[in-house]
Amino acid sequence: MKKIIAMLLALVMVLALCACGQSAAPAPAAEPAAAPAAAEPAATEGKTINIYAWNEEFKGFFEKYYTVPEGYTVNWIITPSDNNAYQDKLDTALLNQANASTDDKVDMFLAEADYIQKYADSEFTQDITAMGVTDFSNTYGYTVQAASDADGVVKGVSFQCCPSALIYRRSIAKDVLGTDDPAEVQAKLDSWEKFEAVAADAKAKGYYMTASFAETYRPFSNNCTSPWVNENNELQFDPMILAWIAQTEKFVENGYTLANSGIWDQPKNDQMLTARPCASSAPPGTSTSAWATRRIPRRAAPATGPSAKAPLLTSGAAPG
């Protein structure tokens, strides 16, 4: 582990974790938390800092607010998350830590809350408090918990978290609901039954209620009370997940949502550019979802109804 990592974490930190340099030889004794900033890096530590991420968002924060010490180079390994490509590449690199050269080892990587637990609970991450990051009084507690292992050891810190909100365009609300007053809109959408009833009204007016089948996943999944895998190591579905699947099937079958688009897919972006601007619902940890987007003629064949993706058993991963 290159000492610069301690300085990175102390400056600004979706959740970033520090990777351990796996080695068959005994690890050198840890230095005091205050030492890294002042100490000269050992020759065996390398001068290239490898940071893994799935997009350049964190890179932008890093380059704006952090000055890399002279003599060091930061190497960004950016791999999109499509088809699990990011996790696959990261996992391969972590498994090769013991054999990688000092300038090729993973030093820091980003992980989303959906799958961070498999890394926090692994041998490839280390206790960040040992590097001097000990004050979490100005952070949301759930971000600290998400990056902690089963023993409560904190392995990472968050540089952002997504709030929850329902955002709507007033002209669309007036068209569909007959009002744009926030209190009245809230009263018309304060239960899933009402939400689904308004979806039918929105369709009649030429709008999609949501911009993809996955948009409402978070409000359901965040209220689950049971794990994906039971004590017998069997996959199980929480009642909230089953309720989301049922709603999703109804929205797809009735044309209340853009059925062939995921949260990050281009058809959703096209809705914002080629049709009326969206009013949006933004569940925690997701992009804004459309309520409501303008319906446009489809050229592609109708998509089949979505199913709940089986998550990584150690992660509780969400679809999309």
Image: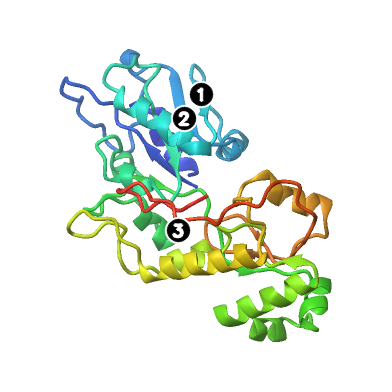
- Pointer 3 or 2: first along the chain: 2
Using the image, determine if residue 73 lies above or below residue 293.
above
Whether residue 128 is visible to the viewer of this picture, yes or no, is no
Q: In this rendering, would 164 be left or right of 184?
A: left
Q: Nearer the viewer, residue 314 or 181?
A: 314
Q: Secondary structure at mark 1?
A: strand
Q: Quadrant of residue 178?
A: bottom right
Using the image, determine if residue 16 lies above or below residue 282.
above
Identified at 27% across, 50% down, the residue is 149
Identified at 57% across, 68% down, the residue is 250
Q: Secondary structure at mark 2?
A: strand
Using the image, determine if residue 308 lies above or below residue 65.
below
Q: Nearer the viewer, residue 198 or 128?
A: 198
Is there CB contact under 8 Å for labels 2 and 1? Answer: yes
Q: List x then y, in percent, for residue 147.
A: 36, 50
Is there CB contact under 8 Å for labels 1 and 3? Answer: no
**Disc 1 crowd, CA 10 A, few/some/many (<14, 14-19, 20+):** few
Mark 2 residue type: Ile
**Disc 2 crowd, CA 10 A, few/some/many (<14, 14-19, 20+):** many
- Pointer 2 or 1: first along the chain: 2
Q: List x then y, in percent, for residue 255.
A: 67, 64
Can you identify the residue that label 3 sits on? 139
Can you identify the residue that label 1 sits on? 74
Q: List x then y, in percent, for residue 156.
A: 38, 45
Can you identify the residue that label 2 sits on? 51
- Pointer 1 or 3: first along the chain: 1
Q: Nearer the viewer, mark 2 or mark 1?
A: 2
Mark 1 residue type: Val
Where is the N terminus found, in terms of image quarters? top left
Mark 3 residue type: Thr
Q: Quadrant of residue 205?
A: bottom right
**Disc 3 crowd, CA 10 A, few/some/many (<14, 14-19, 20+):** few
